[in-house]
């Protein structure tokens, strides 16, 4: 199921999950979401990971064939799971956790019928909470992603040619990030959250509202995916915000940088400098025990005092946060929002993205990925943060 030298890491993750299972009063957790299968096994497969409150995890696999390990049990359908548990001498659960936040209605009802004697409770918040605190192994994978990601961004201006549309530039950036080793997938929690490999917002398109809960929107090319580039030609006087996701290891890093064409208004440069000031002040403040809501408040206060409240985190439509956790998925905890209950803890990894939209000009601001250490935060994405000319 996973490499031999990965066994210790899986044991650590199992221990963390079993701890929250026990605290919840449940007997077991059955997961089938790809992100959680990857977290509990080290790979994505079609099937389920059964995690008892005590004992070994069991991997019930439908596809692919050929996975071999002591705790792998092949099944054709989930109705076989209770019999297989009994065959292994494992008592059926009286209280079972399911991923109610990601299962379809039919999947949920099917599993409820299979475990008809068990009380079913929602385990999604529990496992997402466990995944919020990264292990040292996970942090190294994110650090590796961030290094590749940063290297790609250092070459972002080299693939621009005069007269490009935002889509043409996005395609070249997507090719560049793949050449740097990207897996090509931005994994996001939530069935209504969609994006391709990232976002390129040029000029006025940065002010176009989107239905998705991202920091900024963009009209997109089609109503079926209304986000990011809309096919417009990038013009002098515009800023171009590049927000291409970084997934090089199965773990995400997130970063944005801003480029310009020709002369841009001083207001845009001033707003960008405010974004850098917000980042700097948060770097001084953030450490274990600090509330995510306090960090949001600090950012908002700086933006307001600088006179950019109307442009902060959007103009026509505003995002209600300035940062979010990253890991296997792009949108994990903590969330930096006014009413967030999240408290920073060592091992959290997050993207901080204070941004502004200047009408008729475009988006400015910064986004970097940080890890929370024992004494503060460490920036993982490292490259030039000023507005860089493309021409």
Image (cartoon, helix red, strand yellow):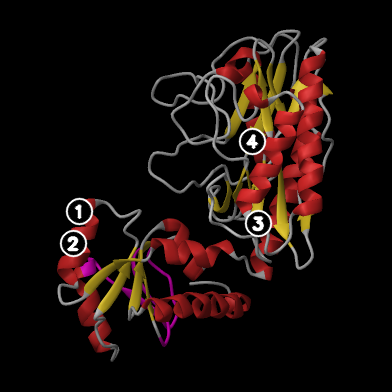
Q: Out of 178 and 144, give the one closest to the viewer.
A: 144
Magenta-tinted stretch: 54-78
The quarter of the displayed image where residue 74 is located: bottom left
Label 2's element? helix
- Identify the disc placed on residue 244: 4
For marks 1 and 4 on the same chain, the one whose residue lies earlier in the sequence: 1
Residue 263 image position (x, y, % from top left): 83, 10
- Between the C-alphas of marks 3 and 1, the distance is 34 Å
Give the distance between the C-alpha atoms of the residues marked 1 and 2, in whole angstroms: 6 Å
Q: Please, what secondary structure does the residue beneath circle 4 have? A: strand
Q: Where is residue 24? Give x, y as percent.
A: 38, 76
- Camera-nearest residue between 342 and 349: 342
Name the residue rendered at 75%, 8% in the picture: 236
- Foreground: 246 or 218? 218
Q: Which residue is mark 3?
A: 349
Inter-mark Cα distance, 2 to 3: 35 Å
Q: Which mark is residue 110?
A: 2
């Amino acid at each position: 199921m996973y490499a031999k030298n990965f066994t210790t890491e899986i044991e650590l993750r199992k221990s963390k999950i079993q701890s929250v299972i026990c605290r919840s009063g449940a007997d077991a957790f059955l997961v089938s979401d790809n992100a959680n299968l990857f977290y509990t096994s080290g790979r994505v497969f079609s099937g389920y990971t059964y995690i008892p409150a005590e004992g070994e995890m069991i991997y019930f696999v439908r596809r692919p064939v050929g996975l071999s390990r002591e705790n792998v049990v092949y099944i054709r359908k989930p109705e076989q799971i209770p019999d297989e548990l009994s065959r292994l001498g494992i008592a059926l659960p009286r209280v079972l956790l399911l991923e109610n936040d990601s299962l379809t209605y039919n999947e949920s009802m099917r599993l409820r019928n299979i475990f008809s004697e068990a009380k079913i409770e929602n385990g999604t918040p529990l496992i997402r909470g466990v995944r919020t605190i990264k292990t040292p192994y996970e942090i190294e994978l994110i650090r590796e992603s961030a290094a590749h990601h940063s290297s790609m961004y250092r070459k972002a201006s080299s693939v621009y040619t005069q007269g490009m549309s935002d889509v043409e530039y996005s395609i070249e950036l997507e090719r560049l990030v793949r050449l740097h080793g990207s897996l090509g997938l931005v994994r996001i929690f939530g069935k209504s959250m969609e994006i391709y490999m990232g976002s390129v917002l040029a000029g006025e398109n940065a002010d176009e509202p989107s239905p998705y809960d991202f920091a900024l929107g963009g009209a997109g090319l089609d109503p079926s995916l209304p986000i990011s580039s809309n096919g417009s030609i990038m013009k002098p006087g515009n800023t171009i915000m590049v927000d291409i996701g970084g997934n090089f290891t199965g773990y995400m890093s997130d970063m944005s940088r801003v480029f310009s064409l020709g002369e841009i208004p001083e207001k845009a440069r001033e707003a960008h400098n405010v974004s850098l000031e917000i980042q700097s002040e948060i770097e001084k403040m953030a450490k274990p025990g600090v509330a995510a809501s306090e960090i949001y408040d600090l950012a908002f206060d700086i933006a307001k005092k600088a006179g950019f409240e109307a442009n902060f985190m959007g103009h026509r439509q505003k995002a209600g946060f300035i940062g979010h956790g990253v890991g296997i998925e792009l949108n994990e905890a903590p969330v930096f929002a006014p009413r967030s209950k999240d408290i920073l803890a060592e091992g959290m990894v997050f993207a901080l993205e204070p941004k502004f939209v200047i009408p008729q000009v475009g988006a400015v601001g910064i986004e970097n990925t940080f890890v929370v250490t024992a004494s503060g935060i460490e920036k993982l994405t490292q490259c030039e943060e000023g507005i860089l000319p493309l021409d």
